[in-house]
Amino acid sequence: MTSSPVKIAASEAPDQPDSSPELEALYRGFEAELLVPLWTEIGDLMPAHPRSKALPHLWRWADLLPLAAESGRLVPVGRGGERRAIALANPGLGGRPFATPTLWAAIQYLNPGEDAPVHRHTQNAFRFVVEGEGVWTVVNGDPVAMRRGDFLPQAGWAWHGHQNATSEPMAWIDGLDIPFQYAVDASFFEFGPDAVDNTETPARSRSERLWGHPGLRPLTHLQPTPATPLLAYRWEHTDRALDDQLALEKEGVTATLGPGHAAVRFTNPTTGGDVMPTLRTEFHRLAPGTETATVSEVGSTVVQVFDGMGSVTVGEHSWSVERGDLFVVPSWQPLTVRSEGGLDLFRFSDTPVFEALNLNRRQEATR
């Protein structure tokens, strides 16, 4: 089976050779041998700054949740589909179920009494709960409660399933590095049991009992792990940390991100680094009337509004936002956020990938 020849497009770059029968014959020879001359492609391959195919886009929670509920009525969860998860498809990525070229985000919905079957995959993943409670995620046999405001990471290649033992449905968002692993041909997947074997409902998971003590590292488990072993970062700790930052600012402690802007990063307690090798996760709180600096960064970001109201500008796009809304910031698109009566934002990005490759770059616009 032979490969189809490539087609060399005419270039609009300066200093191109004049068209001639000899040049056309040369290009046909390149095409036949699957060769492409750099001089016709350099403007696309090496632009002056990142030009992501992804577009800034906003998804309204008020629109997503009814569609998720209707899918709960019509679509069973089980083997084959595995999860009742509805992915955000960036309008610039040709219909692929990708929020950005490297990040996957979805709303997942589980009906009362349902199990999402056990499986594992190399993709790093997390769940973030914007409302509701009652579902248990069971990771390598460790049952972890899911409640509003909780951030629940899960390292790649960990067995996991979800169980809703309550009388109410529940929705949350999933974040994974699926597009990144898909692009670099690194994905593996394996089925586990159909049902989630969980009769426990502990107040704290085993991972929290071991790793969930701020500033304390157990001496019985010293081995650094590439992804966090802590399976739940609880809202009460996040909320208190953000409140304390804003309170200290009122007492005269300088806010390094700007007035009225508090933020925390979820970290791996075994290393102090990001929770997962490919994903950075943060929570930001903006006091009423606060406006952030306009920042451009290499790499892409997905943000969910946890609470409050405000407005965001991504590149040339501006939207008002409220609780649950999700928006995408493609690589090098400038982002500005404005809070009205106060605004809480959960944010995840692919920054660790670019930092590891020394490709990260950040630019703050002059006010």
Image (cartoon, rainbow, N blue to C red):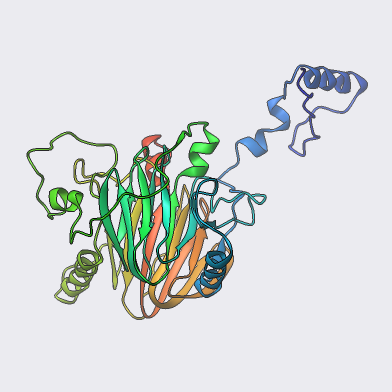
251 shown above or below 268: below
Q: Is residue 302 left or right of residue 315?
A: left
Residue at 29% across / 41% down in the picture?
Answer: 227
Residue at 51% across / 50% down in the picture?
Answer: 331
Residue at 19% across / 41% down in the picture?
Answer: 270
Q: Residue furthest right?
A: 21
Q: How many badges with numbers are in the image? A: 0
Q: Position of residue 129 (x, y in %)?
A: 36, 64
Residue 236 showing in the rendered view: yes
Residue 364 showing in the rendered view: no
Q: Nearer the viewer, residue 121 or 162?
A: 162
User: Which picture quadrant has residue 276?
Assistant: top left
Q: Residue furthest bottom?
A: 341
Query: Which quadrant, please, contains the N terminus?
Result: top right
Q: Position of residue 165 (x, y in %)?
A: 34, 63
Q: Residue furthest left?
A: 219
Q: Nearer the viewer, residue 167 or 30?
A: 167
Q: Position of residue 250 (x, y in %)?
A: 18, 77
61 shown above or below 29: below
Query: Which quadrant, please, contains the C terminus?
Result: bottom left
Q: Is residue 54 left or right of residue 141?
A: right
Q: Position of residue 51 (x, y in %)?
A: 59, 47
140 shown above or below 26: below
